[in-house]
Image (cartoon, rainbow, N blue to C red):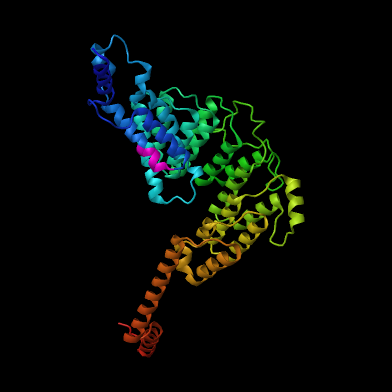
Amino acid sequence: MNRLTLKLAVRTLHTGTVGTKGPTGRDLFNRMNSCIRDNDPSGAWLNYQQLLHMRTTEQPHSLNRSLFAQTPRPRDLPLSARPYIHDAHSRILRVLHINSIHGYSRPHLDQLAQWAAQYVREAAADSHVLAASDVNTLLHVFAVQRNGTAADHVWQYATLTGVVADVTNYNAYINACLRAGNYGRAFEVVREMRERGVQPSTWTQAYLIRLYGETGDLESARREFARACRNSPWTGVAETSSIGTKYWQEKTDDHGVYGLGIGTFNEMLGVLGRNGLMSEMRDLFMRFTGLSVEATDGELQARVRHTGLRPNAHTFHELIHWHATYWDMDTAVNIVRLMSKCGVRPVPKTLKLIVTPQTAERDVETCAQIAILLREEYGVQVSQSVVRIIETAREKAEEMEEQIKSAESQNPTFLQTLSNLTGLSGSAAPPKDS
């Protein structure tokens, strides 16, 4: 067999056709990496799919072993996709990191979830072992999509492939169950975590507080928050108070977990807001931050140094969301002003928490004025979704006014009809006894 025949045989082995010119496995892998570096998810995923397709269309070496006394030479391997498959599985997940994506829409999120589901199928077909960070990435995608079934599949696949779950994996899975509404499963994961002796973190406590709040167990949420605060002056509950030992068993030393973190604080604010305890919510915020709309920059810095607890955007968004939900628009706008004073810039999401279909239908003019205020004073960009909400609510209000005017012009008013009926009933003679 001469050299030309050997090269054609190698080309047939790796591409399935003789003399076909096209991208090699190494070319597709390099293109995928280039798209990942350039933050081009669609291009990276396209090259990843082409690499998988090349792998499936290749003829295995064992079917053509008669051409060689041994496997192909190393210089011929770049033609194949197989040497790059496992590295491609590990690197393509970088395009699924939702934390690096800002302003994603629902169709965009559905596309990412579809990619994640396809990734799990392809990785399982190749017996690819997930890393702990890979598990967290997939769970986060399905958590944002609120797809509990897909999150369960990822957890089962990680368990079957021998991934040793750490506290970050358990936290990501608990969060996915919470977002999907699988509260029973979330309690089971907490119990499983404790039985395996995994040391919980402050985020575990934060998710447990949210879990108690979602299931209506407000007292357990308060006790868990007091436990995080050790001896909280807000609740007056000591650190040694009893908690839900059914789910949080004392099998490991949790001393390192204690201490109030901003995540735990935000979750407790959300629990109070969800239960309509707005006064208690504001009291909690004031006690642990000491902030008010009238606070000066010096007072703010002194208070932050004293407590070590600085509110972030999520803190203010919890306050804004629940005050707007219960139609306390003045307080919601004041919190936006406080947010700006604390150095946290209001963003389009801040406006979306105030202007919702429910609040716009209640008073569309007030919502429109707030949108203008946030745009002019804080430079918040009014998104298209907010514009559509205001326009839809205004059209409904105008339609309702037209219906009322039409009914008044064609029929007597309700008060006039009621007055006529009352007059007729008053002039009627009382019935005689039979």
Quarter assignment of residue 282: bottom right
Where 332 sits versus 290, above or below? below
Q: In the depicted view, which residue is nearer to us: 395 or 282?
A: 395
Looking at the rendering, the stretch of residues picked out in magenta corresponds to 40-46
Quarter assignment of residue 126: top left
- Residue at (36%, 79%) from the top-left corner? 402
Q: Is residue 290 left or right of residue 316?
A: right
Of the 4 image quadrants, the one containing the C terminus is bottom left
- Residue at (54%, 64%) from the top-left corner? 327
Q: Is residue 406 left or right of residue 34?
A: left
Q: Is residue 289 left or right of residue 329?
A: right
Of the 4 image quadrants, the one containing the N terminus is top left
Q: Is residue 219 left or right of residue 397?
A: right
Residue 163: give x, y in percent of width and height.
Answer: 46, 24
Q: In the depicted view, which residue is nearer to us: 286 or 188?
A: 286
Q: Residue furthest top?
A: 69
Residue 4: give x, y in percent of width and height.
Answer: 25, 18
Residue 159: give x, y in percent of width and height.
Answer: 43, 25
Where 18 sits versus 275, above or below? above
Question: Of helix, strand and loop, which mostly describes the magenta segment?
Answer: helix
Residue 88: give x, y in percent of width and height.
Answer: 41, 30
- Residue at (38%, 38%) from the top-left corner? 45
Where 228 sits versus 295, above or below? above
- Residue at (47%, 43%) from the top-left corner? 98
Is residue 126 shown to the viewer in this render? no
Is residue 423 shown to the viewer in this render? yes
Is 104 magenta? The answer is: no
Quarter assignment of residue 83: top left
